[in-house]
Image: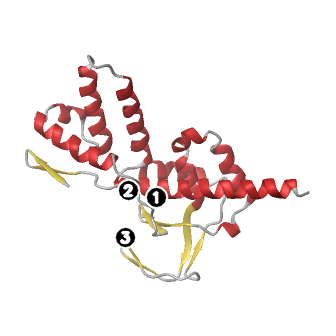
Amino acid sequence: MIIKDISIKYKLPTTWNDINLKQFNQLFKVNELNKELKEDEMDKVLDNTVEFIHTLTGFDKEFIYNLETEKVKDLSVILLKLTNSSFNKVEDELIEIDGNLYKFDKDVTKMSFGQFVDLEHMTKDKNNVWEVAHYIAASFIRPVTKCNKLLNKGKKLFKVKLNSNSYQVEKYNSNTFVGRANLFYEKLGMDYISTTTDFFLTLGNHLQNRIVDSSQSK
């Protein structure tokens, strides 16, 4: 979606993968503020509308305040359509960020107990899982260290069909994934964040049940 104003083109987010976790958490705060507003606090409602648009588009707040009222309404409608939609489950396991290739490693048979314990410690408060979702993503989405069928032409990466022997993924390392989590907080789309979070929560419940069953059987 393109909005034109004073001969300047702005590309608006159209899918959740155009939104990162930093924006999403800020959006959550804006929504919480809106819930607390009273009917006679229209000035704050308008300020929050500006914050809403600013969070999702990156537009300068001064620019938004100077827009025509109808254009602000149009922007709000477009962005609300996105935020009212559901996340999409991502099937593509390869992800390119800043020219580097990562893979969503779903092979739980190779998951170390330390990786599971680290994730459990970080996600104790499941009500605030979005605050640590980038750590979950960084735990499962790790750098591709070797790929025999990746074409690298200049700075552009071309993905080709891979088989299980075409790549090697960096093993989980509790000392290196924090930096990657910080990168994902601002660079990884919310569809990927949501997919890895759902994967972990489902996996976590399964592993916890297995551990409990194993302990009770002794």
Q: Is residue 114 visible?
A: no
Q: Going by the image, does 22 lie left or right of 78?
A: right
Q: Residue furthest left?
A: 6
Residue 110 coordinates in the image, percent (x, y): 69, 68
Instruction: Tell me the mark number nearer the camera, choosing from 2 and 3.
Output: 2
Secondary structure of the residue carrying tag 2 is helix
For image coordinates 22% across by 40% down, the residue present is 76
Whether 44 is drawn above or below 70: the answer is above
> What amino acid type should be assigned to the residue bearing mark 1?
Tyr
Camera-nearest residue between 143 and 83: 83
Among numbered discs 2 and 3, the one appearing first in the sequence: 2
Residue 105 coordinates in the image, percent (x, y): 58, 67
Q: Are circles 2 and 3 on residues that touch, CB within 8 Å?
A: no
For image coordinates 91% across by 57% down, the residue present is 218
Q: Residue furthest right?
A: 218
Residue hosting label 3: 155
Q: Is residue 39 visible?
A: yes
> What amino acid type should be assigned to the residue bearing mark 2?
Asn
Residues at marks 1 and 2, CA–CA distance in whole angstroms: 7 Å
For image coordinates 52% across by 41% down, the residue present is 131
Residue hosting label 2: 17
Residue 174 coordinates in the image, percent (x, y): 67, 53
Residue hosting label 1: 192
Whether 65 is drawn above or below 199: the answer is above
